Image (spheres, rainbow, N blue to C red):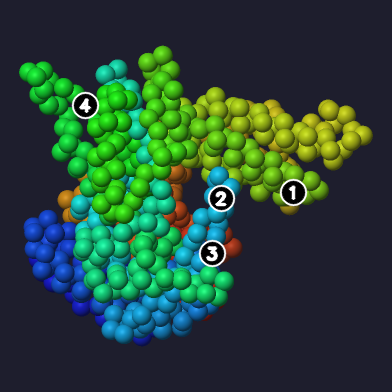
Amino acid sequence: MNGKPCASATKAQSWESIDWKKAAAYVRKLQMRIVKAQKDGHISKVKSLQWLLTHSFYAKALAVKRVTENQGKNTSGVDHELWSTPQAKYQAIGKLKRRGYHPQPLRRVYIPKKNGKLRPLSIPTMTDRAMQTLYKFALEPIAETYADPNSYGFRMGRSTHDAIEQCFSDLNKGKSPQWVLEGDIKGCFDHISHEWLMENIPMDTQVLYKWLKCGYVETKRLFPTEEGTPQGGTISPLLMNMTLDGLERVLREHFPQRRRENGKTVFDKVNYVRYADDFIITGKSEAFLRREVLPVVQSFMQERGLQLSREKTVITHIDDGFDFLGQNVRKYKGKLLIKPAKESVKRLLHRVREIVKSNKSAKQEMLIRRLNPVIRGWVNYHRYVVASEVFSYVDYQIYKCLWQWAKRRHKTKGRRWIARKYWHEIGTRKWTFSAELKSETDEKRYLSLEYATNTKILRFKKIVAEANPFDEKWEGYYEERDGERMLNSTKGREKLLRIWRQQKRCCPVCGERITSETGFRTHTLVQNGKQRLSAMVHPQCHRALHTPDYYLPSRVSQS
């Protein structure tokens, strides 16, 4: 990256006239310069670049765009304000000022957890969310520079599959460690020390202090916040990651890969994998993990105001297996196999049965449309592990559930009649739960249920642990990785792949990358009564293109 200053951001006159491709390029260039300055040890330059980024028009506009297009865009804070119109979004850009900024208290709500308990969420206002996103732009490059190599949660370009694949790499060999410490932090977000954050987070301390001490409102009463970061804030996951970063380096210092003891070479076999606040640590024995490794971890956590849960922090032998991120990791007669966890299978089948029971009188087509996204999402998550047998079991259980649903609707009909009505031969599968669709032609068309066994099992290619998405030298690597993953998601659709490459892997509307995580939609033109494929765009950009009065860039034509 050259040291030339970024071009000044020209202020657009309306939300519709903002050049999002230019805005994304401007912000990314500053982020890459921050990484370069940080690696070179130019701390004063890092601070000046952070100031430049947080005060730029383009960064503020992107921050507003992010909070108005995510899943929480319709959830307001204590002020009940939402930015749903282009005018409101443009006016919101001018509100993102450091001078005179005072965050409002958080709105406290509760959502159910898997164990039946309630998880507290603290929801900031739209303005506070946008401010947090703005400062996150400036803080994330530094966080990525110093992050633990084997930390995978809430990080760009990393997923649970990367963490699972790392577990496989650490445990699959014959000489791999046999004992695993499963770590669980008690209320991680809620108990992080404010003092530690103020001393160690490299950002504007005045703004950070205001966020940490803004309090929350519950039952119309204001309560102070003395510790923790709010679950619901856009910058909270990043702060949590930065709080836990460094544990892998501490473990490496205390327990190197090999050391000399009494004239012998000793291998402690310490490996570390973390996703968000869940982590595992391997070791050569149960006693070693309990007596030597665990005290180091506890000391690290205590310094940051955190504690390990005694009930959930356990030491397990690999032959007994352990659950991690919805997968079960276990050795069977010396061979490591990773399968979908039993609890994950139970939750899926419970969800399927709930949908079927709540649609007793619905049309078959409607039932299929409600089941398919649930089944497809679960299967796509588990397609990278040893899941063939589990997929067959899931299909059988779903079949039994649907058979009971069909029998209940036709109590006087025989089994063959029911089978002919609801199950058809589609492709190579003779028994396919499918509904015939109305067609203007004589050709029969069916809407079929998604079957788990139809999904091909793939081997996931793990990200390089040291990769940094904001470092110039890793740009080519990330482009190749995006291309490979996109190819897998669009296999057999050469036309889509060709268009994606022609667009240089970017959305022609906003200028940001199209990846398998962002998803995409196809935007079409209608000419002479025929549809032809025009471009691949982000889902939110596609919605905007079909919104009345939306400004359409010249490079994309509206259908």
Badge 2: how crowded within 10 Å, few (<14), some, or many (20+)?
Answer: few
Instruction: For marks 3 and 4, give the CA distance.
Output: 45 Å
State which mark lies toward you, 3 or 1: 3
- Looking at the image, residue 251 sits to the left or right of residue 18; the answer is left
Instruction: For marks 2 and 3, give the CA distance.
Output: 13 Å
Residue at (43% x, 17% y) in the render: 332
The mark nearer the N terminus, 4 or 2, is: 2
Q: Which mark is residue 109?
A: 3
Give residue 283's position: percent from left, percent from top. 28, 28
Q: Secondary structure at mark 3?
A: strand
Residue at (15% x, 38% y) in the render: 253
State which mark lies toward you, 4 or 1: 4
Q: Amino acid at mark 4?
A: Asp
Q: Secondary structure at mark 2?
A: loop
Instruction: For marks 4 and 2, give the CA distance.
Output: 38 Å
State which mark lies toward you, 2 or 3: 2
Residue at (28% x, 41% y) in the render: 297
Q: Is residue 63 above or below residue 306?
A: below
The mark nearer the N terminus, 3 or 1, is: 3
Q: Amino acid at mark 2?
A: Lys
> For this rendering, which residue is in front, 135 or 431?
135
Instruction: For marks 2 and 1, give the CA distance.
Output: 24 Å
Mark 2 sits on what residue?
A: 117
Mark 1 sits on what residue?
A: 358
Q: Is residue 13 above or below residue 3?
A: below
Mark 4 sits on what residue?
A: 268
Instruction: For marks 3 and 1, give the CA distance.
Output: 27 Å
State which mark lies toward you, 2 or 1: 2
Residue at (25% x, 46% y) in the render: 300
